[in-house]
């Protein structure tokens, strides 16, 4: 039986499989939003009821999910509309995401900074993808068993000297 591989964002060309790409992006974004919400709820316990706690979770998670969704949908629909796969589509997606961040924070300054930051990141990533570069290296799937050194590390307190060695030249 063939082994199925998980879907990655760049497995299909831009503009195709938008829903799959959206799900690939939203999984880590939603987890990040939930983690940030949990930290906020536990470290700053101002919420007294379950509804207020739910509101804190929604306040952090939904804008992150919305910004990520806007980026994926706008950039992929831009490819379908313009029939070009270039950096301009990613810039449009980054600007839409930055606008959502600005609306979330109710600050034009934060929104402008988010637009600029997301645009720079999007152009760099798209340039790297187009040229076959890797900004973040692939994960190393060599298993290590509960240690930094791994199973091949010599755990003895005094290591044995190498045998058959001499102190000078022959």
Image (cartoon, helix red, strand yellow):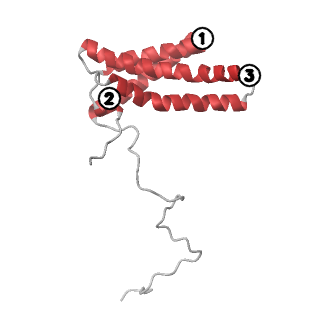
Q: Which quarter of the figure has residue 23? A: top left
Task: Give the secondary structure at mark 2.
Answer: helix
Residue at screen point 38% across, 44% down: 138
Residue at screen point 48% across, 19% down: 67
Marked residue nearer the N-terminal end (1 or 3): 3
The numbered dot on residue 3 is none
In the picture, measured across the screen, residue 136 lies left or right of residue 114, that is left
- The residue closer to the viewer here, 170 or 28, is 28
10 Å crowding of disc 1: few (<14), some (14-19), many (20+): few
In the picture, measured across the screen, residue 68 lies left or right of residue 58, that is left
The numbered dot on residue 127 is 2
Residue holding disc 3: 49
- The residue closer to the viewer here, 74 or 16, is 16
Marked residue nearer the N-terminal end (2 or 3): 3
Task: Give the secondary structure at mark 3.
Answer: loop
Marked residue nearer the N-terminal end (1 or 2): 1
The percent position of residue 153, horizontal first and vertical second, equals 49, 67
Instruction: Select label 1 or label 2 by which is in front.
Output: 1
The percent position of residue 94, horizontal first and vertical second, equals 42, 19
Q: Which quarter of the figure has residue 158? A: bottom right
Residue holding disc 1: 106
In the picture, measured across the screen, residue 71 lies left or right of residue 79, that is right
- Asked if the residues shown at circle 1 and circle 3 are in contact, with their CB atoms under 8 angstroms apart, the answer is no
How far separated are the C-alphas under marks 2 and 3?
A: 47 Å
Q: Is residue 88 visible?
A: no
Q: Residue furthest front?
A: 1
Instruction: Select label 2 or label 3 by which is in front.
Output: 3
The percent position of residue 142, horizontal first and vertical second, equals 41, 55
Q: Is 144 placed above or below 51 here?
A: below
10 Å crowding of disc 3: few (<14), some (14-19), many (20+): few
10 Å crowding of disc 2: few (<14), some (14-19), many (20+): some
The percent position of residue 22, horizontal first and vertical second, equals 40, 25
């Amino acid at each position: 039986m063939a082994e199925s591989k998980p879907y990655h964002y760049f497995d299909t060309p831009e503009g195709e499989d938008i829903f799959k790409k959206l799900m690939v992006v939203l999984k880590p974004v939603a987890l990040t939003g939930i983690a940030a919400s949990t930290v906020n709820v536990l470290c700053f316990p101002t919420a007294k009821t379950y509804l207020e706690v739910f509101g804190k979770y929604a306040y952090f998670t939904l804008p992150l999910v919305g910004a990520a969704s806007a980026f994926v949908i706008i950039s992929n629909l831009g490819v379908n509309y313009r029939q070009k796969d270039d950096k301009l589509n990613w810039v449009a997606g980054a600007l839409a995401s930055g606008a959502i961040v600005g609306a979330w924070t109710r600050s034009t300054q934060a929104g402008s900074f988010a637009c600029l930051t997301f645009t720079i990141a999007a152009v760099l990533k798209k340039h790297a993808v187009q040229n076959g570069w890797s900004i973040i290296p692939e994960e190393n799937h060599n298993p290590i068993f509960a240690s930094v050194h791994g199973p091949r590390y010599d755990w003895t307190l005094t290591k044995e000297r190498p045998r058959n060695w001499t102190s000078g030249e022959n």
